[in-house]
Image (spheres, rainbow, N blue to C red):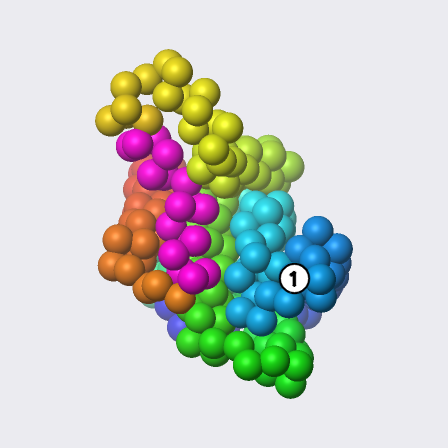
Amino acid sequence: MFTIYQRELKSYFTQPTAYAVICIFLFMSLFLTFTLGSFIQIGDANLEWSFFFWHPWIFMLLAPALGMRLWSDEQRSGTIELLGTFPTTIWSAIVGKYLAAATVWLVALLLTCPMVMAVNTLGDPDNLTIFSGYIGSYLVCCSFLAITCLISAFTRDQVSCLIISCSICVLLVIIGFRNIETEIARNFSSATTDAIVSTSVLNHLQPLLRGSIRIQDLTYFGSIIAACLVCTSAILNAKRA
């Protein structure tokens, strides 16, 4: 698994893909923070609404853009068949490739640390709340990446993988909006509405942005990641059979 992880991570940084995604992420983060986020006007020292709030919107586009090649390339080129001849398992390959992509996003988030340094210079923020916000942001990104990993196991076409993955990620974001919840409540019972709305990443991200690290939120993100990777393994094993 570690060998695959190293190989994949190296491939990201020997090609322009990772650099392009990271640069776009940094630009969009700063742009949204200082425009729609009104960072200076509202004095958001903890970066809750001006900075972290926009990350799911960025990730739902860029996480699939980075992850769409995870298995689509392997299937199109036929190299997935060679995995059976390597001294490794499909599961090890999945985890190795996934962790490599997740590491790229970890680097991207770490490159936003100057924002933290800036707010500490200008004010007196709660750094534990900021740290919790980073955890929440990274979990959202890893969840979207896991969804993309699963979709890429279904299709050989990267564009199809990108479109489907983005659509699912968008749905997981907007389903937590009050207007969407109201529309759902008109057609379903309150219990069903609560169950549907609880699948929104925003409902589990917001407590983390406020500095509250709850077991149910960590379980939510962990379940998405684990379920997607396990399903990816099942699909790839079935295709090899």
Quarter of the figure that contains the C terminus: top left
What residue do we see at 45% from left, 46% from top? 202
Above-or-below relation of 132 to 149 = below
Q: Position of residue 122 (x, y in %)?
A: 66, 81
| Residue nearest the viewer, comparing 96 with 50 | 50
| Residue nearest the viewer, comparing 93 with 213 | 213
Q: Position of residue 105 (x, y in %)?
A: 55, 64
Res 61 → quadrant: top right
What residue do we see at 55% from left, 33% from top? 167
What residue do we see at 53% from left, 61% from top? 48
| Residue, disc 1 | 42
| Residue nearest the viewer, comparing 62 with 215 | 215
Q: Position of residue 169 (x, y in %)?
A: 51, 40
- On whether residue 202 falls in the magenta region, the answer is yes
Q: Left or right: 153 with respect to 35?
A: left
What residue do we see at 36% from left, 39% from top? 199
Q: Identify residue type, mark 1.
A: Ile
Dot 1, crowdedness within 10 Å: few (<14), some or many (≥20)?
few
Find the magenta span and give its range.
194-210
